[in-house]
Amino acid sequence: MQEIKRNIANRVLLLYGAVFLMAVVIMAKVVHLQTGGGAELRAKAKELILEKVEIKPMRGNILSADGRLLATTVPVYDVHMDLRAPGLTEKRFRRHLDSLAYCLASFFKDRSAGQYKQLLLLNFRKGNRYLPLAKRLYYKELEIIRKFPLLRDGPNKGGLIVTEHFQRIRPYNHLAQRLIGRVGGNRTAVGLEAAYNEYLEGRPGLRLMQKLAGGLMKPASDIYEKEPEAGCDIVTTLDIELQDVAETELLKKLMESNADHGCVVVMEVGTGDVKVMANLKKMADGSYAEALNYAISEAVEPGSTFKLMSLMAAMEDGLIKPTDSVQTGNGVWVISAQRKLSDVHGGHGKISVARAFEISSNVGVAKTVYNAYKNRPEKFLLRLKAFHLGEPLGVEIPTEARPVIMTHKGRLDPYSIIQKSIGYELMLTPLQILAFYNAVANNGVLLKPRFVREIRQKGRLIKQFPVVVLDSSLASPATLTAARQMLRGVVLNGTASALRSSPYAVAGKTGTAWVYQEGKGYTVDGVRKYRASFVGFFPADNPQYSCLVMITDPQGPLYYGGTLSAPVFKAVADRIYATAFHLHEPINRSLPHIADTNHPQVKTGRAFLTAAVLNRLNITNGFAQLGAEMVEAYFDVYRFRSRRKPLPEKGILPDLRGYSPRDAVALVEQVGGRPLLEGRGAVQEQLPPPGTPIRRFQTVKLKLG
């Protein structure tokens, strides 16, 4: 009995001892944790913390009018390796280490296989759970990496961690770069990306992420808690082919003239759709790039292109007619002892208002408008405001510059009328100028420029943007008709005669303005800066497109709107005309199959030589019988016909325009002159002019083209 009690007592003591020992161990562990020995455990605990993280959705696309991608979002992938993945044993790791290092070195070519082996081994020993292997991989590259040793075994056995991101790209690179715009980052959001961000950005999703040491996170699973919703696509009005032509031609002229910057805008007359918006700026290294949307964001003094607005104001108020006369004198108008106004190319005496507009006479236009409004300057201001020239267009693109009509306490003085009539003391953006001209072409309907036609989500139409009319009747039909006739006259008989040869009728206005240099005036150290522009529409008799070209601060002698900006207008308009078959004249099928364009051009020359060439081409003609006579050939429906060209009088220089170089040289020598040829082709210009008496061996310059 005593023995039994002793055994029980020993067991109780043993139990108490075990409990005491356990308590001591627990206390020791608590002390160890409190004194810093638990840092490693706390780090492990942090790794087990899960958090729901917002996942950005795929951004919507920006499309051209014909559905081409202007901006799109593609997924890119970051690849990491968890070297403490549950199934990644040391044995498996070491067995595949060499082959994995070789594959990584062969693919990335940034380290040798030996260096990759050392990197992987070092991080395995450290137990790194998030070793970066690659960033911003495209899907095809990711698929290659997924087949590498170890990584092909997935996240559990191979430690593969893939994180998806989205990257914005523009398939056409720099084309319309500023108009397409950007969002995100530290820079200001601009362009269509900013204007339609609410449609493009989509709705974010949620994903469970695991926090790792060092503030890193990795996906806890491949399943989203909430799927992100992709953004909508916006279909713009832009024509990417025309955009390319406009930027190329603008770049040529900017480089040719070494100008600071320029822009081109094309609108569809009836809808206000912006088909082209190109902006180029000279950078520090001398190259050109899209740095600012000058067409929208830069308000400038327009110069002579504003003469249309000032004359239309006076016509609309019933104060003038295009047929009225104005005295330009010798081209200098002395306004006061301190002020005078001059014409660039001298005076033209007494001419009509329409003619003053065609030749862009500052004196003629300014006198006309001044005389109309000098006793009632406030009426001029009110008419300009009635034309909406003091209001922004309200386009969705951010940073539209506000137009300014400068006044003194809200009033105009008489001299201010003179300045404004020729495009100074007021500021408009290129797009605001073009919108006005577009309204003139559109029978007085002023439209808000449209950049986006519709919004689509996964191909389904969800919103359309209608044409927005800002004013259904900008001016009376009589004023609009007169304005269009004057604009046509500029091309036919005025400063834009270089566009006269186009196969379609053009109406427009040139502009050459001084550039005000902030705080310094228009002239600094005897030097002025210029702004050359041309704005117009075509076809003139049934306008379909309007276009503005503006080039700022060209260097050298080439700074007029007619010689610098008009050629860019023509190149863009030619491209439109070449592809817009509805603008072409219909074929008259009642005529023979052979059309005018199927026969060669024949230069003026001796009849028997012309006959020899046409006979060689099997083209019917009756020139041989005219022998050595000089003839001008022309095609008249069925066959070539001729007009006799009289032989030159002795000692008198004949009209050589249209002659071949060979015949022109012969005729010059026949009258005793010495010919000097420039260029190639037929004679375009000659100096001295036709009818000039020629001294023996006098030089006659013949410009060919």
Image (tube, rainbow, N blue to C red):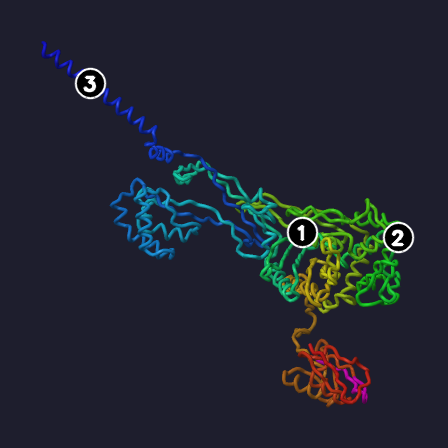
- Circle 1 crowding by C-alpha within 10 Å: few under 14, some 14–19, many from 20: many
Mark 1 and mark 3: Cα distance apart in space: 89 Å
Tell me whether the residue at label 3 lies in contact with that at label 2, contact meaning CB atoms closer than 8 angstroms: no
Above or below residue 608? Residue 679 is above
> In this view of the protein, can residue 173 be seen by the observer?
yes
Give the magenta-colored segment's residue range.
Answer: 640-653
Residue 220, disc: none
The location of residue 315, given as percent across then percent down, is 84, 54
In front of the other: 150 or 10: 10
Which residue, given by chain and number where applicable, does mark 3 sit on? 15
Disc with the residue nearer the chain's start (3 vs 2):
3
- Circle 3 crowding by C-alpha within 10 Å: few under 14, some 14–19, many from 20: few
Disc with the residue nearer the chain's start (1 vs 3):
3
Mark 2 and mark 1: Cα distance apart in space: 33 Å
Q: Amino acid at mark 1?
A: Ile
> In this view of the protein, can residue 502 be seen by the observer?
no
Q: Residue at x 88, y 49 (%)?
A: 376
The location of residue 262, given as percent across then percent down, is 66, 59
Which residue, given by chain and number where applicable, does mark 1 sit on? 296
Residue 374, disc: 2
Between circles 1 and 3, the one closer to the viewer is 3
Instruction: Determine if the magenta segment contains residue 153.
Output: no
Q: Amino acid at mark 2?
A: Lys
Q: Amino acid at mark 3?
A: Leu
Q: In the rendered image, which quarter contains the C terminus?
A: bottom right
